[in-house]
Amino acid sequence: MLSYKKLNSLERKEAIFLLEQSMGFVWQAALRSVAVLGIADYLADGNKSIKDLASEAKVSEDFLYRIMRILASRGVFHEISERVFCLTQSATFLCTQHDFSLRAAVLMLTDKTFWQPAAQLDGVLKGSPVFNELFGMPFYEYWEQSPASMGENIFHAGMASMSSVENEVLVDSYEFPQNAVVADIAGGLGNLLLCVLRRNPTLTGILFDRSDVLAGNRLHLLNDDERWQTVPGSFFEECPPADIYMLKYILMDWPDSKSIQILKNCRRSMKQDSRLLIFEPMIKSDDNEQGRYEIDILLMTSFDGGKARSEKELSAIFERADLRINKIINTDSYLSIIEAVPV
């Protein structure tokens, strides 16, 4: 006689949990769809019915309702009455005109350059260069050279969007010395440096990046052009002299050998009392906030050798560049501030 095993209540609960988790990607897909369509912008002036939203967005009313329904179940939008929706606090960050809009960040993080490689993690585990196979070139080269980067660069716009919120947390978490020169290495459009200079009126800044990136910088918004300058260059060659060096989301993008090269170029330009600040997710021994492991997986799938490092792993590459960790500040986010000083 065939035996029949019945699942107990705990086993059933855990089995259902596993199935639920395997469908999680559809939530991110729904979030991306409303970001692409700009649905939050249509609600910026007040509540609207699905019929009106669908009409303005020129999409299927039934399909849009089903998407809004799942997003509302996660706290993004709220169904205040039958088929009538409004913005929640979370959804306001999808509005294009919000001072801290995250719409571009959502579009970047759910872009095919992250989505498609992540779908092939099994290939990554076997050592396949999945990103290169999908897009024909490494990540940064794709965004520099691919026709997909024409017009607004999704990657740079997305990073600037993420920074709008993250920089508030970072700058509140670190005490900058008076009258220092702060260099933002590969600082993109300058959003981090702009935030630092606004909060610290005695500081002056250097935005260091490629010429084509610097051309779109936002430092003019400081309304004091005497406190900043742009310097074109590559951190693989040399870095400008400064008192404070900031590297946000830089080391994590590169394997150890490249990260050490970047650090050595910073070290050559540093004075003995200079400080090097690394802003990125550091894998802690416990209590890692949501976002640290997730960013690490994005790095594993889309970047050649990129990884979120532990304190031990960071110490090892700093040592190779004649630097040491002076202190670590764990912020109220998935980002840590690692302060390194010359040995």
Image (cartoon, helix red, strand yellow):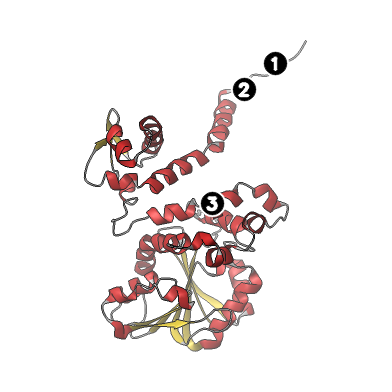
The outermost residue toward the top is 1
- Which structural element holds mark 3? helix
Q: Please name the amino acid that badge 1 sits on.
A: Tyr
| 215 to 11, vertically: above or below | below
Instruction: Name the residue that disc number 2 marks.
Output: 7
Say few, some or many: other residues with alpha carbon within 10 Å of mark 2 (under 14 / 14 to 19 / 20 or more): few
Seen from the viewer's position, the closer of residues 10 and 308 is 308
Q: Estimate the spatial distance between the alpha carbons at disc 2 and disc 3, rounded to whole Å.
A: 39 Å
Sequence order check, earlier mark of 3 and 1: 1
Left or right: where 326 falls relative to 38: right
Q: Estimate the spatial distance between the alpha carbons at disc 1 and disc 2, rounded to whole Å.
A: 10 Å
From where the camera sits, is residue 84 visible? no
Sequence order check, earlier mark of 2 and 3: 2
Instruction: Name the residue that disc number 3 marks.
Output: 112
Q: Please name the amino acid that badge 2 sits on.
A: Leu
Left or right: where 61 falls relative to 45: right
Q: Please name the amino acid that badge 3 sits on.
A: Lys
Say few, some or many: other residues with alpha carbon within 10 Å of mark 1 (under 14 / 14 to 19 / 20 or more): few
Instruction: Name the residue that disc number 1 marks.
Output: 4
Q: Determine contact: label 2, label 3, CB under 8 Å.
A: no
